[in-house]
Amino acid sequence: MQFSEPSSGELPDFPVPRVQLMIGSVFAGFLAFIAFVISASSLVTGHLASAVAAFAFAVFVLATASFARSNQTSHTSGAPAGRLVQGSTVRYKPSGLIRLALVTASMALCAIAFGVAAGGAVAWIFATMGALLATFFVPLLITRSIRQGRLELTADGIRHRGWAFEAEIAWDGIGGVAFAQRDYPAIYVLVEPTKQIVRHYTTQFWKIEALHPGHVIELDCRRFDIHPMLLAQWIRFYIEHPDSRIELGTTAAADRLIYARF
């Protein structure tokens, strides 16, 4: 569905499930408290592996709840929206990948430590699971196969770098912009049927974000710390005003987004 133009000074609301997030945070806090108590008790009695497993589990549940809270649609506009905007590049929220990495690392450590504490066949199963998780994720971060995402508008076209994929389309291949409401708000850069999107995954082992199978470039609005309507209008402006693309990469493009000069 094509997005509609908001009236002057108004931006549509994208509801955040605050009650569910609050309940999840309280439950995570309760589980983490129990895990911290078990960890401290195990440490006192000399069971180091059990202490590490319980501590890692506490970190895991807290990091998971924290990621869920950060992975919501932003309502930021005006000057505060410029924090992650440089020229015509809009970066992902940095906290998202950091928290996801913490979730993964704590899960791996918990599995390994639990396996060591349990012993026997269970030790091999859990230790192997944790080791594989760490072995897959850590090298991908080090080699930057998984890295912070961004959206770039350049003189040539639109380039989207997700956590684990890249997609690019030239300006003459873009047919418009639309909003799509899936389980989350998303912006679709619509591509002409006769044009091809240059896209690929940067890792084959852990596709933590999926490329849209359709003839579009999908922007998951939860990744950006800016109101989705502003981002969509900004993209549409440069689609419809090719003469203004000369300012892409400059502060003029950033100011146009931040201060809604459409």
Image (spheres, grey):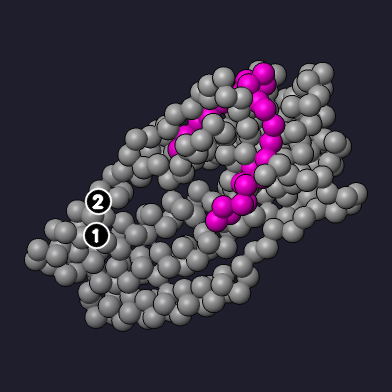
Q: Amino acid at mark 1?
A: Ile
Dot 1 crowding, Cα within 10 Å, few <14, some 14–19, many 20+ = many
Name the residue at the left extreme.
Answer: 120
Look at 62% across and 47% down and name the residue there. 180
| Dominant secondary structure, magenta | strand
The quarter in which the C terminus is drawn is: top right
Q: Residue at x 73, y 55 (%)?
A: 75
In front here: 2 or 161? 2
Q: Residue at x 77, y 55 (%)?
A: 12
What x and y, as percent, mark residue 64? 46, 63
Q: Which mark is residue 157?
A: none
Name the spot of residue 131 as percent of width and height, x first: 24, 51
In which quadrant is the N terminus drawn? top right
Q: Is residue 142 above or below residue 66?
A: above
Does the residue at mark 1 contact the one at mark 2 (Cβ under 8 Å)? yes
How far across and how far down the image is residue 198, in percent? 51, 23
Q: How many marks?
A: 2
Q: Which residue is mark 1?
A: 112
Comes first in the chain, label 1 or label 2: 1
Q: Is residue 179 magenta?
A: yes
Query: Considering the numbered disc 2 on the image, is that residue within a helix, a strand or a loop?
Result: helix
Q: The disc labelled 2 sits on which kind of residue? A: Ala
Residue 172 lies within the magenta run: yes
Name which quarter of the figure residue 18 lies in.
Answer: bottom right
Q: Is residue 28 left or right of residue 20?
A: left
Residue at numbered disc 2: 131
**Res 112 visible:** yes
Residue drawn 37% across and 59% down? 106
Q: Which residues are magenta?
A: 164-187
Q: x, y (%) of residue 248?
A: 75, 24
* Residue 247 makes an appearance in the image: no
From what the image shows, is residue 179 above or below residue 161? below
